[in-house]
Image (cartoon, rainbow, N blue to C red):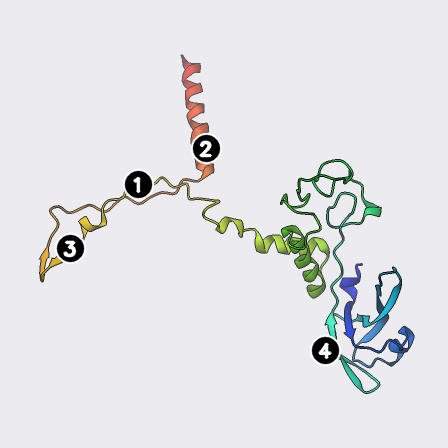
């Protein structure tokens, strides 16, 4: 079972570096069980790991506590967001290079060769003209939202992805420029000819009365295909009878 389903991971900022992980685990006071404490580390210019004042805690609970107490001081607990997995072999999301089963892809152009000095930029994930690791990549933003949903609602990756797709499946269809209405456009009459014109308080009626336009029927793509198939069937039947 994924860790996100049976526990919750949080961050505590501002803890003194002198406190060890064991000491923190024993002395952090809260209303939930703390399974693990891990101090976050960063790498300096010489590629040496150094401790920070940020501590990651794993709690045996569905929800994180608002804060924890340490020697009479209270620290706010924030939700820890797991880093997104991105392969450095094929540059797709969801797995690491060590477990990649796909063909090596170029980081620049996305073709089937090792990265080199390609000038053309083409993201392997969204097709955009940028690097696949770009923070503004639409697919990367999608993965961040899926990752957040997994941790907030205790879902598996598949469940969180299905929920995201369900919530965003009509986003593109709302763009009328990309998906115009296929309803046949009827000739529009001059709207002023059907209105009364008032000149100096005198009402002038139109010379003739226009009948209301017939209601327009929307024609779907499926109806067009069905009509074409029926027409072809009738034509073939006539040829057989002849």
C-alpha gap between disc 2 and disc 4: 60 Å
CB under 8 Å between callouts 2 and 1?
no
Residue sitting at the far bottom: 72
Q: Nearer the viewer, mark 3 or mark 2?
A: 3
Q: Secondary structure at mark 4?
A: loop
* Residue at the disc numbered 4: 66
The disc placed on residue 196 is 3
> Who comes first in sequence, dot 2 or dot 1?
1
Please determine whether, in this image, residue 96 is positioned above or below residue 114: below
Per the image, the residue denoted by label 2 is: 226
Horizontally, is 237 left or right of 98 in the view? left
Decide which of tag 3 and tag 4 comes sooner along the chain. 4
Residue 165, horizontal then vertical, whole percent = 61, 52
Residue 36 vertical placement versus 181 (above, below) = below
Q: Nearer the viewer, mark 2 or mark 4?
A: 4
Give the side of residue 214 with respect to residue 184, left or right.
left
Label located before the other in sequence (3 or 1): 1
Horizontal side of 108 relative to 3 (left or right) equals left
Is tag 3's residue or tag 2's residue first in the polypeptide sequence?
3
Looking at the image, tell me whether mark 1 or mark 4 is earlier in sequence order: 4
Q: Earlier in the sequence, mark 2 or mark 4?
A: 4
Disc number for residue 186: 1
Task: Give the alpha-carbon distance from disc 3 to disc 4, as whole Å.
Answer: 68 Å
Q: Which class describes the residues within 10 Å of circle 4: few (<14), some (14-19), or many (20+)?
A: few
In the image, what residue occupies the spot 48% across and 50% down?
175
Disc 2 from disc 1: Cα separation = 23 Å
Mark 3 burial class by Cα count in 10 Å: few <14, some 14-19, many 20+: few
Q: CA distance from mark 3 to mark 1?
A: 24 Å
- The residue lying toward the viewer, choosing from 168 and 48, is 48
């Amino acid at each position: 079972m994924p860790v996100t389903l049976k526990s919750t991971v949080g961050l505590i900022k501002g803890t003194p570096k002198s406190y060890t992980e064991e000491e923190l685990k024993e002395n952090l006071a809260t209303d939930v069980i703390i399974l693990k404490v891990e101090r976050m580390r960063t790498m300096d210019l010489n590629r040496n790991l150094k401790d920070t004042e940020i501590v990651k805690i794993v709690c045996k609970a569905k929800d994180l506590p608002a804060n924890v107490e340490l020697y009479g001081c209270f620290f706010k607990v924030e939700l820890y967001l797991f880093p997104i997995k991105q392969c450095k072999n094929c540059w797709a999301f969801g797995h690491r290079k060590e477990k990649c089963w796909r063909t090596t892809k170029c980081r620049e152009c996305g073709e089937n060769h090792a990265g080199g000095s390609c000038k053309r930029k083409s993201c392997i994930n969204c097709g955009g003209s940028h690097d696949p690791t770009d923070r503004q990549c639409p697919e990367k933003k999608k993965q961040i939202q899926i990752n957040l949903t997994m941790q907030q609602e205790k879902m598996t990756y598949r469940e969180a992805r299905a929920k995201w797709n369900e919530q965003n499946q009509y986003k593109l269809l709302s763009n009328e420029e990309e998906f115009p209405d296929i309803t046949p456009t009827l000739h529009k009459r001059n709207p002023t000819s059907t209105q009364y014109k008032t000149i100096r308080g005198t009402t002038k009626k139109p010379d003739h009365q226009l009948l209301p336009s017939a209601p327009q029927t929307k024609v779907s793509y499926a109806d067009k295909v069905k009509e074409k198939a029926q027409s072809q069937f009738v034509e073939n039947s006539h040829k057989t009878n002849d």
